[in-house]
Amino acid sequence: MEQLLEELRQGLPRGEIPAALFGNDEIYNLELRKIFARCWVFLGHDSEVPASGDYVRRKIGEDNFIVVRDEDGEIHALFDACRHRGVQICRADSGNTEIFRCPYHGWAYDTKGNLLGAPLWKKAFGGMSKEENGLLSVAKLATYHGLIFATLDPTTPPLEEYLGGMKWYLDLVFGLNKHGIEILGPPQRFVIDANWKSGSENFSGDDYHLGTLHRSVWAIGAFPVSFADNMMGYHIQASAGHSLSFSMAPTEDDPGPKFFAYPDDLAASFNTARIDQEQLRVARRSRVFVGNVFPNFSILAAPMTDDGAHFPPTGVLTIRTWQPMGAGKFEAWNWFCAYRNMTPQQKERVYKSGLASFSMGGVFEMDDTEPWILAARTGRSVTAEVLDFKLNYKMGLPGIGIAKRTENWAGPGIVYSPRYEEGVQRNFFRFYSELMRAERGTWPKFSLE
Ligand code: FES
Ligand SMILES: [Fe+2]
């Protein structure tokens, strides 16, 4: 395993990554400790738990957490394991309660995780401290535009520092108007026999696959920009590990879709209440935003339709996590988002168009999962191991392809255009490589290349 990590470190400047990273069990076990037990991990949106007592069950790595709003309105992420024998307490995906009661012997906890009591308390535990037997909690929890993140490591930098330059782009998507976003319905979940990093690196900005893998999407009129035009735009290494990509019109006067093809009356509410003029101008030219907050939180805003013959594509915002379940298995969690000031009809368009495109049965998602399954098979193959198989991430390296670094850009990060470029993925793996080799308690120093 140490050899694999060393090969990664040395190969990255040349765009070479050992295939075994997508299938090796030891690497996976280390990822749970070095990545998921240290990074800020996305848990949900505060609109999913609007009232006191509202809760949803979420994951950090493979472990369950109860994300709950307490009676004072504060959100907690409690490790879902009873302090008596470690039994999982919460059996529902979501709900509202004042008390979480363990099914084994009946210990009861409040919405802050405090132990309230247990059956036959005096006889069984009289004299024992309740304070020391509350549910364990994440080390830190913070929200950004209502997005709830948590970390298990108290030494991880604060969320806003961790996001760094990525904040500018999250502002641009989630702060387009003063109303903000809400989640439409519970998340969809589906298990894929592939490695979680395939989702993260794809959403870091793999636009190159659209013309091949998703060719059929154009055939049914579900996407309003030609493949060649869609490759125009920018690849951005926003900050350590966090990358994104914009498909963008050449000018603000371009006749194509504006603001990700959101309806004109909604777009009229996009303003500078929460973002600046430059962010608004970038959003106006944008057709697609796709990005990944390290390690496994992805965001996509793009024009979609479920029925091209009757409805033009409309902006759809989906957020997702790639929840690890092993070196060769992950669960995709998929939420659709609406701006709160959308009409009910507009929200319905978003939901139906999202379901038809980026969901278990969506035309994009069904395409995407298949190659990720095949890549994971190579990742765990003996042949890849003994023949020392390296994957190719060379697109856009000096002398390779047409992408050029551009300084003419209003936002933070390192920016390349057009989108024939894989520096966005190399940024993901450079930070990954640093973290996989870092000791707990020290946070890697990282500079964008
Ligand atoms: S394990 Fe929860 S009460 Fe005993
Ligand atoms: Fe795709």
Image (tube, helix red, strand yellow):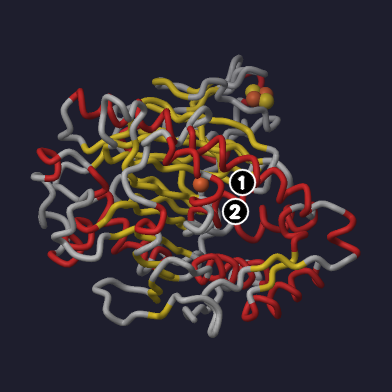
As measured in the structure, the alpha-carbon distance from the residue carrying label 2 to the one carrying label 1 is: 5 Å
Numbered-mark total: 2
Q: Is residue 18 left or right of residue 441?
A: right
- Position of the N terminus, as image quadrant, is bottom right
Q: Is residue 73 above or below residue 372?
A: above
- Kind of residue sitting beneath label 2: Phe
Q: Please state the horizontal and vertical placement of residue 387, each as a whole percent of the image.
A: 88, 66
The answer to whether residue 53 shows anywhere in this view is no
| Camera-side residue of 359 and 447 | 359
Q: Is residue 172 left or right of residue 417?
A: left
Q: Please state the horizontal and vertical placement of residue 278, each as a whole percent of the image.
A: 17, 67
Q: Please state the horizontal and vertical placement of residue 392, each as a whole percent of the image.
A: 66, 68
- Kind of residue sitting beneath label 1: Gly
| Camera-side residue of 32 and 391 | 391
> Which residue is denoted by mark 2 in the rendering?
36
Instruction: Confirm or reject: label 2 Cβ below 8 Å from ligand 2.
Output: no
Which of the numbered marks, if any, corresponds to residue 61? 1
Q: Are marks 2 and 1 in contact (CB under 8 Å)?
A: yes
Q: Name the residue rendered at 36%, 33% in the picture.
A: 69
Q: Is residue 152 above or below residue 55?
A: below
